[in-house]
Image: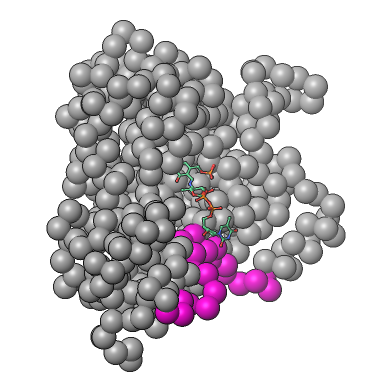
Amino acid sequence: MIAQSNIHLALLGGTPVFESKIHVGRPNVGDVELAMSRFQQIFDKMWFTNGGEFVQEFERKLCEYLNVRNCIVMCNATIALEIAARGMGLSGEVIVPSFTFVATAHCLQWQQITPVFCDIDPETHNIDPARIESLITPRTTGILGVHVWGRGCDVDAIGEIANKHGLRVMYDAAHAFGCTHGGKNIGCYGDAEVFSFHATKFFNTFEGGAVATNDDALANKIRLMRNFGFTGVDKVDHVGVNGKMIEMCAAMGLTNLDHVDRFIEVNRLNWQMYRNELSSIEGVRLIAYDEAERMNYQYVVLEISNSAPLTRDELVEVLHSENVLARRYFYPGCHEMEPYRSYFPNARLLLPQTERLARMVMTLPTGTAVDETAIRKICQVIRSAFGQANSVKQVLMTNGLR
Ligand code: T4K
């Protein structure tokens, strides 16, 4: 057990608490030997891509796991979002939160669809349905919600608005694999939902993503678009692109899918440990997960309020100097990134909650790469940083924040 006294912080001349870097987003890997034997089979069969056996098996198993009719795997979630948006016929303007990874906005802008940024609910961090209607114009064709941290959007309210105005709905579910909302698996909401299986996600296929939908016609269209629009040998009936997942990634996905419950349990226990360690620290709020739902707990999210002795950015500096690579999320909001910043220079006036949370929110390392000892040490660094806030501020003022 580590003593609760202040650590001699690296920023104040001490030795970093961790010798090597602790990451947010360290990949989880299931059974490496099984993965290797699957990789060997790929070389034995000399079938690398284009709807191979592992991709087909992975899609079948994902449909079972998610209880959804269609799950179309892709090379990554960004391409999956683009193809889904195109398959749904989105055009003109689409309403989207700015408090998200920039891929959510880019998937629209990439195809000349204007992302219209909507503010978020300060409690859920998800798109605020109460703000959507005032953004609808004659050019609006859809709403793209993001289930931030895996916590489901207010799908009922969004669905109602969409029905009233004849809009399509899709969800960026990059954070939400394995989560439920309203007791149903995320993957079944809206016209389509998109998962990311990037290496930094708790369930990964190296790189990868998938579109889940119960709309068979849309699924068929998306399948064609994923493969250049080919409907048969030498026959193209659709504009398409190359969004295919390769066999190596599907093999990794199959291997990790068997361990997904274990990864979630590890994340849940880590999250609980952080909760216990951080509960008494003034100015730090750990984002909670609904225990009535199945959540993946893949993000340990803190809001650092004005009453904390250090700002979020100052705390991140302290943690980095101890080799804890905490991340600011989502910083800055998409509306502050190019080209959106130039296109909509006044967007921030309509996004007060996004602006506020982008200054307050950070994430801490979790997953199979951290253990109880590491979590206790990370929390002790936070306590020590707050305990020596004046000295920390002075050093940062002299050296300048990065
Ligand atoms: N929508 C949302 C809401 C998303 O969050 C994302 C992706 C997408 C859509 C698009 O999904 P994909 O097209 O990527 O499937 C990462 C990921 O690249 C990205 O997938 C993720 N969201 C985003 C939030 O974060 P970076 O720029 O933070 O990655 P990077 O290289 O800084 O890595 C983060 C940490 O993880 C580092 O400390 C190093 C560690 N790491 C990383 C990799 C790649 C490892 O330990 N091993 C690794 O293999 O973007």
Q: Which residues are magenta?
A: 14-34
Instruction: Give 165 or 144, whichever is nearer the viewer.
Output: 144
Instruction: Give 89 or 56, whichever is nearer the viewer.
Output: 89
In magenta stretch: residue 23: yes
Instruction: Please identify the residue farthest to the front as the structure is shown.
Output: 398
Please state if 290 lies on the left or on the right of 243 as rendered.
left
Q: Quadrant of the N terminus?
A: bottom left
> Which residue does the image show at 38% across and 44% down from the upper left?
331
Query: Residue 49 occupies which quadrant of the picture?
Result: top right
> Which residue does the image show at 25% across and 67% down from the upper left?
389
**What kind of colouring is applied to the model shown?**
one colour
Instruction: Give 58 or 381, whichever is nearer the viewer.
Output: 381
In magenta stretch: residue 53: no
Image location of residue 203, percent across then percent down: 50, 58
Instruction: Please identify the residue farthest to the top as the structure is shown.
Output: 138
The chief SS type of the magenta part is: loop
The number of numbered discs placed on residues in the rendered structure image is 0
Vertical placement of residue 319 versus 143, above or below: below
Residue 35 visible at all: yes
Query: Residue 94 occupies which quadrant of the picture?
Result: top left
Image location of residue 112, percent across then percent down: 50, 17
Please state if 64 lies on the left or on the right of 241 as rendered.
left
Instruction: Give 218 or 10, whichever is nearer the viewer.
Output: 10
> Which residue does the image show at 27% across and 16% down from the upper left?
136
> Which residue does the image show at 57% across and 34% down from the upper left?
79
Image location of residue 304, percent across then percent down: 24, 57
Image location of residue 313, percent across then percent down: 34, 54
Residue 158 visible at all: no
Vertical placement of residue 66 versus 136, above or below: below
